[in-house]
């Protein structure tokens, strides 16, 4: 199975509604095993990540107030993408492509007053 990233908006009732996202390839956040082998790994946690490691145990919802911190986390991981890829057993371009999709979703979410990111 694939791990997907989507943008959503919070409705007034507190529930969320998915927005239209780019074609399928641009919504990939990894394979199911990347929940633990990459995003939830010790090397990612060692860099201070607090959002993406949650994927090791559950789906991730990042609401609008947390988007800037989430983007900062993604930027930190990108800075260390080569060492993370080596430590986590994936290709550097695989890691950067997943981060590209995740950060693009976060930027789309920022353009909505109640936007957020869902990775599931």
Image (spheres, helix red, strand yellow):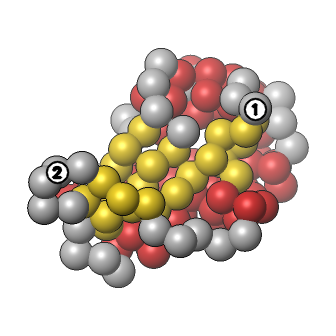
- CA separation, marks 1 and 2? 29 Å
Residue at the farthest bottom position: 111
Quick one: label 2, few (<14), some, or many (20+) residues within 10 Å?
A: few
In the image, 79 versus 61, the foreground residue is 61
Point out which mark residue 105 bears.
none
Considering only vertical position in the picture, is 92 above or below 33? below
Residue 99 in percent (x, y) is at 63, 56
Is label 1 in contact with label 2 (beta carbons under 8 Å)?
Answer: no
Q: Kindly identify which residue carries mark 1.
A: 1
In the image, 115 versus 73, the foreground residue is 115
Q: Which residue appears at 34% of the width and 49% of the height?
A: 62
Res. 31 visible in picture: yes
**4 relative position to 103: left or right:** right
Res. 69 visible in picture: no
**19 relative position to 32: left or right:** left
Residue 54 in percent (x, y) is at 43, 28
Q: How many marks?
A: 2
Q: Which residue appears at 83% of the width and 36% of the height?
A: 90
Q: Which residue appears at 45% of the width and 74% of the height?
A: 108
Q: Kindly identify which residue carries mark 2.
A: 14
Quick one: label 1, few (<14), some, or many (20+) residues within 10 Å?
A: few
Residue 64 in percent (x, y) is at 26, 61
Residue at the farthest left position: 12
């Amino acid at each position: 199975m694939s791990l997907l990233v989507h943008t959503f908006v919070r409705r007034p009732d507190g529930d969320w509604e998915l927005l239209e996202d780019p074609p399928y390839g641009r919504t990939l956040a990894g394979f199911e095993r990347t929940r633990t082998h990459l995003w939830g790994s010790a090397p990612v946690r060692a860099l201070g990540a607090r959002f993406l490691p949650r994927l090791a145990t559950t789906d991730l919802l990042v609401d609008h107030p947390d988007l800037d911190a989430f983007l900062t986390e993604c930027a930190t991981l990108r800075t260390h993408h080569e060492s993370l890829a080596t430590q986590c057993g994936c290709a550097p371009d695989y890691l950067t492509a997943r981060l590209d999709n995740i950060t693009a979703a976060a930027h789309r979410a920022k353009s909505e007053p109640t936007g957020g990111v869902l990775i599931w």
